[in-house]
Image (spheres, helix red, strand yellow):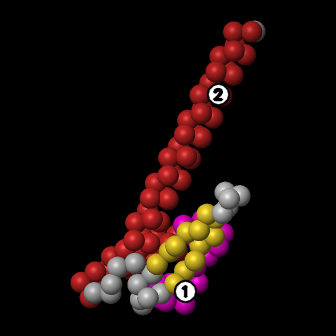
Amino acid sequence: MDAALTATLALVTAVLGYALAESRHKREIGAKMVDLAVQILGQPLRKEVQPLRDWAVSVLAKYAKELDVPLPAPAQAALNGEPFYLDAVFTAKATSRAHFRSK
């Protein structure tokens, strides 16, 4: 009986470890995608990169929705209309605030 319990616990531990690692990996990729999207939206407007800007806005909208802070259509349109800059300010309490500005 002890061997079966040990094997079950080992299996559960392995599955949970895999699930946590997978979740962390997805969050890291998501953060990199959002960073890339913000960089793209910070570039000057040019007709030839409009499809890339559309993609960047859709990335931000996707991750905003996943975090239960949907990005409304008017905000998406505004992001696609002019360069977007993000200045992160970190305080001593290890919290952050984002300041959005347009050029």
Q: Magenta stretch?
A: 63-79
Q: Position of residue 78 (x, y in %)?
A: 49, 89
73 relative to 43 in the view: left or right: right
- Label 1: state its secondary structure: helix
Residue at image point 53% right, 53% down: 27
Residue at image point 33% right, 84% down: 44
Image height of 20 relative to 80, above or below = above
Name the residue beneath numbered marker 2: 13
72 relative to 81 in the view: left or right: right
Which numbered circle lies on residue 35? none
Which numbered circle lies on residue 75? 1
Task: Pick the residue in front: 86 or 50.
Answer: 86
- Label 2: state its secondary structure: helix
Query: Which amino acid, by three-letter code, is at mark 1?
Result: Ala
Task: Pick the residue in front: 66 or 41.
Answer: 41
Image height of 33 relative to 23, above or below = below
39 relative to 93 in the view: left or right: left
| Few, some or many residues within 10 Å of mark 1 (<14, 14–19, 20+) | few
| Few, some or many residues within 10 Å of mark 2 (<14, 14–19, 20+) | few
Q: Is residue 42 magenta?
A: no
Q: Position of residue 51 (x, y in %)?
A: 32, 80
For residue 67, say whether it is visible.
no
Residue at image point 37% right, 74% down: 40
Q: Position of residue 21 (x, y in %)?
A: 54, 40
